[in-house]
Image (cartoon, helix red, strand yellow):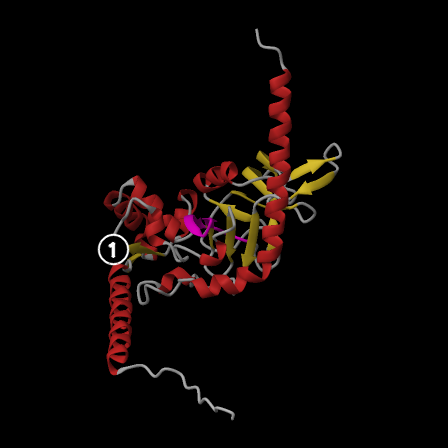
């Protein structure tokens, strides 16, 4: 005799269905609250206009109204340094002048896909800005002026190479590039301090405010060389330059009408970053291994030195 057994999935009871519905309802409520809180926390912007016939007096009023630190923040949000403030015909001004510049970040505060990457640098052509992450957490961002239309900056993945506190530009020997950090040795591309005029103006390099360039100079890792400096044994901090620019518009001027106009979402950055993840992790592991070997060798050598 063959016993036929009919198997069926356990159907959820009315009680379990009610529990599931309650969980989903609570999740939906939390998402709504998070969205509303995020909207409430957004910085609002207004315009500070400089009329052509009264530009000097308007600039004097601007300097009188805001402290030096506040002026620095406002100019940075407008992709300007103090030297180039005269170029402004209008400035966006935040309603909250926060001490922490991260409050104004258009980049996501965290990236789960980056959690295993020690250090990561992004430069966005579209919004004229850079972002630094450590294990997926945004630690710094700021303005940048990148390659102009005639001499665009190479996009894609690159790695930090060598650095020099003062370098001479290959385009003009009179241009001194402070806190220069090379990211493409054969093309001569690097980030460094130089004029921020409120538009893309460089000869393919990545211009920064001096405070930012100096900070990044100490933060990023260089390459590791061997064979008396003739061969690259390991690459430095990964850098991705991405996005497009029309080389005309100033996207931050959209912020007064739309506070989210310049935002780059986590999904946006994942599309840029994730395809390069295997290569970045491979290079990171290689660099760590070589640096650990170097430290171990240095320690052994130190231990061999006789102590008095």
Residue at mark 1: 95
User: In which quadrant will I find the C terminus?
Assistant: top right
Q: Position of residue 74 (x, y in %)?
A: 33, 49
Q: Secondary structure at mark 1?
A: loop
Residue 136 within the segment the image draws in magenta: yes
Given residues 157 and 62, the one toward you in this image is 157
Left or right: where does residue 152 sit relative to residue 61? Answer: right
Determine the image quadrant of residue 249: bottom left
Given residues 197 and 15, the one toward you in this image is 15
Q: Position of residue 261 (x, y in %)?
A: 38, 65
State which region is magenta.
132-146
Given residues 184 and 56, the one toward you in this image is 184
Q: Position of residue 271 (x, y in %)?
A: 52, 65
Residue 8 within the segment the image draws in magenta: no
Left or right: where does residue 221 sit relative to residue 111? Answer: right
Q: Main secondary structure of the magenta part?
A: strand
Residue that sits furthest to the front in the current view: 1
Given residues 107 and 281, the one toward you in this image is 281
Q: From what the image shows, is residue 289 above or below residue 297? A: below
Q: Residue drawn at (52%, 38%), measured in percent from left and top?
A: 217
């Amino acid at each position: 005799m063959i016993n036929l057994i009919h198997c069926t999935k356990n159907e959820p009871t009315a009680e379990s269905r009610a529990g599931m519905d309650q969980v989903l309802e609570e999740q939906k409520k939390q998402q709504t609250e998070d969205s509303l809180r995020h909207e409430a926390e957004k910085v609002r912007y207004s315009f500070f206009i400089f009329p052509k016939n009264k530009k000097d007096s308007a600039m004097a009023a601007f300097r009188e109204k805001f402290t030096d630190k506040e002026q620095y923040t406002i100019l940075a949000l407008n992709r300007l340094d103090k030297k180039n403030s005269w170029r402004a015909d209008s400035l966006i001004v935040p309603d909250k002048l926060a001490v922490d510049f991260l409050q104004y970040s258009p980049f996501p505060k965290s990236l789960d896909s980056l959690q295993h990457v020690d250090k990561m640098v992004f430069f966005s052509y579209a919004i004229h800005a850079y972002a630094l992450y450590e294990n997926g957490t945004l630690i710094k961002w700021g303005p940048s002026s990148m390659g102009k239309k005639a001499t665009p900056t190479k996009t894609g993945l690159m790695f930090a190479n060598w650095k020099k506190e003062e370098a001479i530009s290959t385009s003009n020997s009179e241009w001194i590039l402070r806190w220069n950090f090379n990211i493409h040795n054969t093309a001569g591309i690097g980030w460094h301090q130089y004029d921020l005029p409120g538009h893309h103006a460089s000869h393919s390099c990545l211009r920064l405010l001096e405070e930012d360039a100096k900070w990044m100079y100490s933060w990023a890792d260089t390459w590791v060389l061997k064979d008396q400096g003739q061969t690259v044994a390991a690459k430095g901090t990964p850098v991705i330059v991405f996005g497009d620019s029309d080389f005309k518009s100033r996207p931050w001027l959209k912020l007064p009408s739309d506070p989210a106009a310049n935002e780059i979402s986590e999904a946006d950055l994942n599309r840029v970053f994730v395809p390069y993840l295997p290569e970045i992790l491979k290079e990171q592991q290689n660099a760590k291994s070589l640096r650990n070997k170097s430290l171990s060798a240095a320690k052994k050598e130190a231990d061999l030195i006789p102590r008095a």
